[in-house]
Amino acid sequence: MSELAEEQDIDRSKMTVSDEIAVEIIKMNKWYGSFHVLRDIDLTVNRGERIVIAGPSGSGKSTLIRCINALEEHQKGRIVVDGTELSSDLKNIDKIRREVGMVFQHFNLFPHLSILENLTLAPIWVRKTPRKEAEETAMHFLEKVKIPEQAHKYPGQLSGGQQQRVAIARSLCMRPRIMLFDEPTSALDPEMIAEVLDTMIELAQEGMTMLCVTHEMGFARKVANRVIFMDEGQIVEQNEPEEFFNNPQNPRTQLFLSQILGH
Amino acid sequence: MSGTHAHTVGFTRDTMIPQADPPMTSVGAIGWAHKNLFSTWFNAIVTVASLALIFYVLAMIVPWAISPTWESSSLSECRDILAAANGGESGHGACWGVIRERWVQLMFGFYPSHLHWRPVAAFILLGVALAPVLFSDKVPAKLLYFTLAYPFIFPWLLWGGTIWAPLSVAAGFGVGYLAYRIVSAVAGDLLSVLAGVVAALVWWLVLSGYVVDALAGLIPIGLEPVQSRDFGGFMLSITIGVVAIAASLPLGVLLALGRRSDLLIVRYLSVGFIEFIRGVPLITLLFVASTLLNIFMPPGTDFDIILRVLIMVTLFATAYMAEVIRGGLAALPKGQYEGADSLGLNYWQAQRLIIMPQALKISIPGIVSTFIGVFKDTTLVSIIGLMDPLGLTNGIRADTNWNGIVWELYGFIALVFFVFCFSMSRYSMYLERRLHTGRK
C-alpha cells in the first residue's frame, strides 16, 4: 500500500459532488452460467463522486464495473449511464463507451502501436477528430501523466507504471465523463504504484467521476467520498471512508479490513 | 572491496563493480566454435561426422553439376562431349543442353513467343504492385493505387482481348458501391451491403457482356488474345500461385472471423466450408474443376479451365489460411478486445486497427507456410493436363533427343521452386523483425 497519498495535501476544492446522476444501477443481476455473480445491485453515483469498491477476490467487484460499460452483459435490472440506458442496442453501448473511460489491471495497451498512436487511435476513429488535433490532445495528456518523452516508443519498452499512466492518458483523450478503474495497481511492482496513484489523485482533484476497484486503502481514505464493500456478489456495506475504516458494521467488512490492514 | 566473512553479518559496499568484458573464450570465432561445435566430446564427434557427410555429398554433386554440356542439343551429344572430356572413356556429368534448349518453354509453356513480353511485363508490374504491400516502410503509400488497379491489369496482359473487359469488371465494383450508397441512405447496413452485392452481380453477369461488346465495337482497343491452353511453365505456376495467395489471405481473414462470430448461421457456414475443403484432397477439387464442373454448366458455356483451377486452388488455400489466422486470433489476449471495446471502437474498427494487425503478425510463420505450400501445390495441375513445368517435362522427355534425361530437368525445376519458396521464407523473417516492437 502506498504511503504517498498520505503525505500529499489533497486539494478538495474542486472535488465537489453535484446532484446530477452519472450512473444509476437498479436491481441489477448477473449470472455466469448458473453462477449468480451479481445479486440485486443498487447503486447511484452522482457526478463528481469518487467511489472505491473493495472486497475479497471473487466478490464481483470487477464484474460490477465492467457491466457499466457493457464489457459484461447483465441479465436483469437496469443500468443507466449519463441518461442512456444500457440495453442490447449497439448504438447505446457505443454511445456509453464513448463517454466512459476504463483502465485495466493489465493496461491493455496496443503493443503494435506507438504510445502516441495508442492515444490518438480512438479520438481519430471514434470521435473523428482531425489527426493533428488528436495528437495535440494526446501530448497534453502525456504531459499530464508526466511521460511526454515516451510518445514515440512502444508499450513494450515502458515500465509497468509508465504503461498504466499511458493507459490512463489514453482513456482521457476521449474526454470521458466517467472513469472506471479495474485494479489499476494490482499488476505493478511496489515502487511503481505511487506514480499511478498520483495520477489518479490528480484526476480526482479535477472533479472526475470515478469508480475504482482497488486494494489501495490509503487511496480510498484520502480520495474517495464513498467506499463500497462487496462480498458474494452483493453490496455488503457502504459508507464514507472515515466511518468505513474506523467503524465497520458488518462482520464480513470487519474481517476483510482486519485481513488487509492487519499487518 | 573486502569479501564478506561468514561470521560478519553487516556488510556495506563502498565501491560499485564496473561493467567488465566477458572472458576471451566466450567471444569471437574461437569462442563461437567452442560453444556451438565442440562444447562436449559428443558434440565434437557430431560436428566432425557432419562435416564429413557434407563433404561426401558435395564431392558427388559438384563434379557432376560442373559439366561442359551447355551447348549440346541432344542426350547422345552430351555423352560424346563428356566422353571426350574424359579421354575417350564414358564420362559422368550433367547434360545441361536440355535446359538451354527448353528453358523458354519451361518459363512460358506454349505462349506465343512474339508475345512473351506480356507475361514478363505482368510479372515486373507485379513486383511494383507488391512493393507498397511488402515494404510499406520504404515505398510511398501512393503506389497502393496501382496495387488496387493491378488485379485488372494482370489478367488483361496475360489473356489479352479488349481493354473494356477488365474495365467493365472494375466498373462492377463501382456499381456495387453506388448501390450500397443509395440504399444506405434509406435502409440499414445489412440491406445496403446486400443491395451492393446484388447490383454488382447483376452488372457482371447480365449487363457487362453487352456493354463490353458495344464499347469494343465502338473503340476497339485491345491486345491479341491468348488461349488458356497455351499457358504453361513457370508463368502458369506463378499465375496460379499469386492469385491463390493474394485472394486466400483476405478471404481467410473473413472466414476466420466468421468461425469466431456470434452469429450462429455465419459460424456454422464457416465451419462447414473449412472442414469440407480441408477434408478433401486438392487433387479431388482439381478433378471437379476440370471435368465434373462442366456437367453442371449449361451446354456451350465456356468456363475457362485456368479460371476454374484458380477458384479451386484459392478455396483450398482459403480454408487453410482461415485456420492459421484463427490460431493467431486465439493467441491474442482478451484484454486487447476489451481495450478496443472500452474506447468505443466498433467491431470492424477493432478488427482492422487492433486485432488483425496483431493476429496476422503472430500468424506470419503459419501464413507463409501456407503460401509456400500453395505455391508448390500448383504443380498438381499437371495431373489434369495443364502444362505447368512438371507437365512440360513429360513432353520434353518424350522427345527423342532428350529421351532418358531426368535429374537435370527436375533439378532445374526444383531449384526455381526453391528460389521462390526460400525468398518467401526470408521475407517472412524480415517482416517479423520489422514488426517487432519491443519486449512484451
Image (cartoon, rainbow, N blue to C red):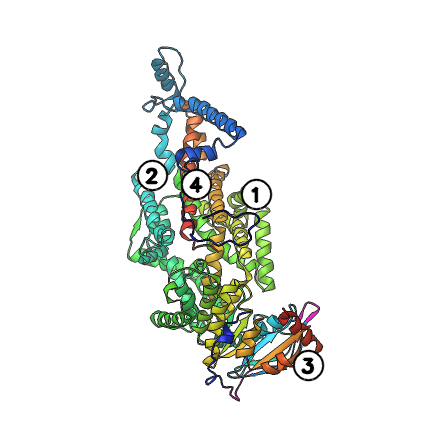
Is disc 4 on the same chain as disc 1?
A: yes
Q: Earlier in the sequence, mark 1 or mark 4?
A: 1
Which kind of residue does numbered mark 3 sit on? Answer: Gln
Is disc 3 on the same chain as disc 4?
A: no
Which kind of residue does numbered mark 2 sit on? Answer: Pro
User: Is A23 a magenta residue?
Assistant: yes
Kindly identify the residue that appears in the image at 63 percent across and 80 percent down: A246
Q: Is residue B79 above or below residue A10?
A: above
The residue beneath circle 3 is A249
Nearest to the eye among marks 2 and 1: give it.
1
Is disc 3 on the same chain as disc 1?
A: no
Mark 3 in CB contact with mark 2 (< 8 angstroms): no
Kindly identify the residue that appears in the image at 34 percent across and 28 percent down: B101
Q: Earlier in the sequence, mark 4 or mark 2?
A: 2
Q: CA distance from mark 4 to mark 3?
A: 72 Å
The residue beneath circle 4 is B421
Is disc 1 on the same chain as disc 2?
A: yes
Q: Position of residue A100 (x, y in %)?
A: 50, 76
Can the viewer see residue B187? no
Q: Secondary structure at mark 1?
A: loop
**Nearest to the observer: residue B290 or residue B170:** B170
The residue beneath circle 2 is B112
Would you call the spot at circle 4 few (<14 residues within 10 Å), some (14-19), or many (20 or more)? Answer: some
Query: Residue B291 got which mark?
Result: none
Q: Residue furthest bottom?
A: A19
Q: Chain of mark 1?
A: B
Give the magenta range.
A17-36
Q: Earlier in the sequence, mark 2 or mark 1?
A: 2
Q: Secondary structure at mark 4?
A: helix
Would you call the spot at circle 1 few (<14 residues within 10 Å), some (14-19), or many (20 or more)? Answer: few
Q: Is residue A162 left or right of residue A212?
A: left
